[in-house]
Image (spheres, rainbow, N blue to C red):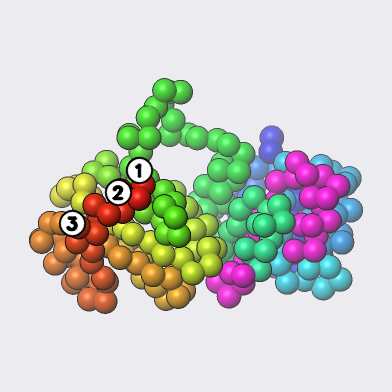
């Protein structure tokens, strides 16, 4: 069974995390109330995963990440953070943390992020699966990210999409091009959730432009948020030239 070390200076938070982690099928092998205690516990128990709070007395989470990774570079550390600690999460990831969980944490997010850092792909059907079958694609093109939502995107894919977007939001001065040219009627149900995530990026001082060549689709998106900016066919052609 996968062993987990929980690091948080709040006992109620540790208890809450422990309950959710164990309900999700993992084993909590130890707890620590600060970064220094986390280092000692890691050395003793060698857990498969560490959940690490950021702001703690004695030794904060970022310092603990540096200390653990220096001695145990194979350590898998997931930061637990609030929305206001974005820059500190980015620093933790730069220093070896593998991922993060934004509070309030849910069992679904725990499973999603744990599976991701452990390399578990429950949806994979074959080793030859092509990226063309993926419900969405994220590509970095120079200084911006192009996110293509495919017609196969369904509500069940929202959890993974949300986790990937939260990680993307660690980028400084994030610029996103959202391409929804491929979506059909079946994709309209999760479209509001996708747009809500784009709004979160804008509210975090990011930049979002949308490519929606279908007029009805543009009107639907405009009704969700009239402040969205749309790009033209010429714009998307230029982006594809850069990609090549």
Q: CA distance from mark 1 to mark 2?
A: 6 Å
User: Which tag, 3 or 1, sits closer to the chain's start?
Assistant: 3
Q: Which residues are magenta?
A: 61-87
Question: Residue at coordinates 49% horizontally, 69% vertically from top-left?
Answer: 173
Q: Which residue is mark 1?
A: 244
Question: In the rendering, at what x and y percent does residue 203 appear?
Answer: 42, 76
- Bin the neighbour count of mark 3 within 10 Å (Cα to Cα): few under 14, some 14-19, many 20 and up: few
Q: Is residue 74 visible?
A: yes
Label count reads 3
Question: Residue at coordinates 64% horizontally, 50% vertically from top-left?
Answer: 98
Q: CA distance from mark 3 to mark 1?
A: 17 Å
Magenta region includes residue 79 = yes
Q: Quadrant of the C terminus?
A: top left
- Bin the neighbour count of mark 2 within 10 Å (Cα to Cα): few under 14, some 14-19, many 20 and up: few
Q: CA distance from mark 3 to mark 2?
A: 11 Å
Q: Is residue 16 above or below residue 115?
A: below
Question: In the rendering, at what x and y percent does residue 189 appear?
Answer: 23, 55
Question: Residue at coordinates 30% horizontally, 65% vertically from top-left?
Answer: 209
Question: Residue at coordinates 19% horizontally, 61% vertically from top-left?
Answer: 232
Q: Which residue is mark 2?
A: 240
SS for dot 1: loop
Q: Which mark is in front, 3 or 1?
A: 1
Could you tell me if the residues under marks 3 and 1 are in contact, i.e. CB atoms within 8 Å?
no
């Amino acid at each position: 069974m996968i062993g987990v070390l929980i690091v948080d200076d709040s006992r109620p938070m540790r208890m809450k995390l422990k309950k959710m982690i164990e309900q999700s099928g993992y084993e909590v092998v130890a707890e620590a109330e600060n970064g220094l205690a986390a280092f000692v516990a890691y050395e003793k128990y060698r857990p498969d995963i560490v959940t690490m709070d950021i702001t703690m007395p004695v030794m904060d989470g970022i310092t603990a990440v540096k200390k653990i990774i220096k001695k145990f570079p194979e350590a898998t550390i997931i930061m637990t953070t609030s929305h206001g600690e974005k820059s500190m999460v980015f620093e933790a990831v730069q220093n070896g943390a593998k991922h993060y969980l934004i509070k309030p944490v849910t069992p679904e997010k725990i499973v999603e992020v744990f599976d991701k850092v452990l390399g578990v792909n429950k949806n994979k059907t074959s080793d030859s699966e092509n990226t063309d079958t993926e419900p969405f694609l994220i590509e970095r093109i120079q200084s911006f990210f192009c996110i293509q939502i495919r017609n196969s995107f369904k509500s069940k894919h929202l959890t993974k999409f949300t986790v990937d977007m939260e990680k993307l939001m660690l980028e400084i001065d994030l610029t996103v091009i959202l391409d929804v040219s491929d979506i059909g009627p079946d994709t309209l149900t999760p479209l509001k959730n996708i747009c809500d995530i784009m709004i979160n990026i804008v509210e975090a001082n990011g930049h979002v432009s949308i490519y929606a060549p279908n007029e009805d689709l543009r009107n639907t998106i405009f009704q969700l948020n009239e402040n969205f900016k749309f790009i033209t066919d010429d714009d998307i052609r230029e982006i594809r030239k850069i990609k090549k």
